[in-house]
Image (cartoon, rainbow, N blue to C red):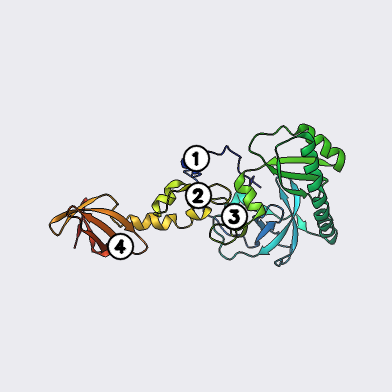
Amino acid sequence: MGDIFETEYEEKEDISKLDEYSEGTNSDEIFVCPKNLYSAKLEYSCEGVYVTAPDNFGKLSPGDGVIIPTRYGNDLAFILGKPTAPVGIKSGELIEIDRRASDDDLSRYKEHMEQEKNAFGIFKEKVAAHGLDMKLITVHFLIDEPKALFFFSSENRVDFRELVKDLVAVFKMRIELRQIGVRDESRITGGLGVCGRPYCCHTISDKLPSVSIKMAKEQNLSLNSTKISGQCGRLLCCLSYEYNWYAEAKKTLPNEGIHIFYDGTNFKITDVNPLTQMLKMLGEDGRLLEIPAKRFQKDGNRWKII
């Protein structure tokens, strides 16, 4: 299973540094949905995964626990259901279920939840003792092996070697510390966005989409960083939701800034609204007109109004 956490990078005031878009992220791979495909979730990280079960495994229902391999070791995941129309899946991302979670596994999971609460306080004490700049996000104990994961955020790189030694002495097991980015922190902890609804990354999808300033421009949104950024300080994930629709819709409309001769006057298009299908034009004579998009027709390389 791939690493779901983004790499931490330095905060900048320049809005262009909020851009997280990268070309070439789409794949033309044709995905054939396996017969026994299920959607599952790792509770500690709010990560959704697609898992497959062997033919003789039997039926799985929502809420059932299964043990699956993860990048940190075998761990417990809970079945969400059987997807009917999976989107954006690559065959290499599918995880094969190792086994059903036994009663002992589920009992151990509940015990670990209590241990994780205590570990949270111990970690903070040790961090304060070492004078480290670290913010603990979540703690997780693996089901299949004695191993504890501590996910934290920090504005700087942290030398936590001595801290790990102290934690090993306390918990008597393998310790892994993972520094994660601000978007991952929001995805794990959750909260309410500027829209008043729970974070998309926490409730709708754990996949952190690539987002760019271009998407905000395409949707005629304000480029004020406080208005197009989420609580994590990065561009809103939802900017990517309707970008493709806006991009396709604008291909059939004139661009802002072009000049059109109409009614004896030169006009400049000042606003294009794909949603209302209305365009605003400012004429050299001072007139401001609002004209339906259906009246614009392209004649060769020029636009005209009919």
Query: How many marks can you see?
Result: 4
Of marks 2 and 3, which one's residue comes earlier in the chain? 3
73 and 42: which is toward the camera: 42
Q: Which residue is mark 2?
A: 226
- Cβ–Cβ below 8 Å for labels 4 and 1? no
Q: Nearer the viewer, mark 2 or mark 3?
A: 2
On-image quarter of the C terminus: bottom left
Mark 1 to mark 2 CA distance (whole Å)? 14 Å
Badge 2 amino acid: Thr
On screen, residue 73 versus residue 295, left or right, reads right
Badge 1 amino acid: Lys
Of marks 1 and 3, which one's residue comes earlier in the chain? 1
In percent of width and height, residue 6 lies at 60, 43
Mark 1 to mark 3 CA distance (whole Å)? 20 Å
289 and 274: which is toward the camera: 289
Q: Could you tell me which secondary element the residue under label 1 belongs to? A: helix
Question: Which label was assigned to residue 201?
Answer: 3
Badge 3 amino acid: Cys
Q: Residues within 10 Å of mark 2 (few under 14, many from 20)?
A: some
Badge 4 amino acid: Met
Q: Which residue is mark 1?
A: 17
Q: Which residue is mark 4?
A: 278
Q: Residue at x 65, y 43 (%)?
A: 180
Q: Nearer the viewer, mark 3 or mark 4?
A: 4
In percent of width and height, residue 183 lies at 60, 48
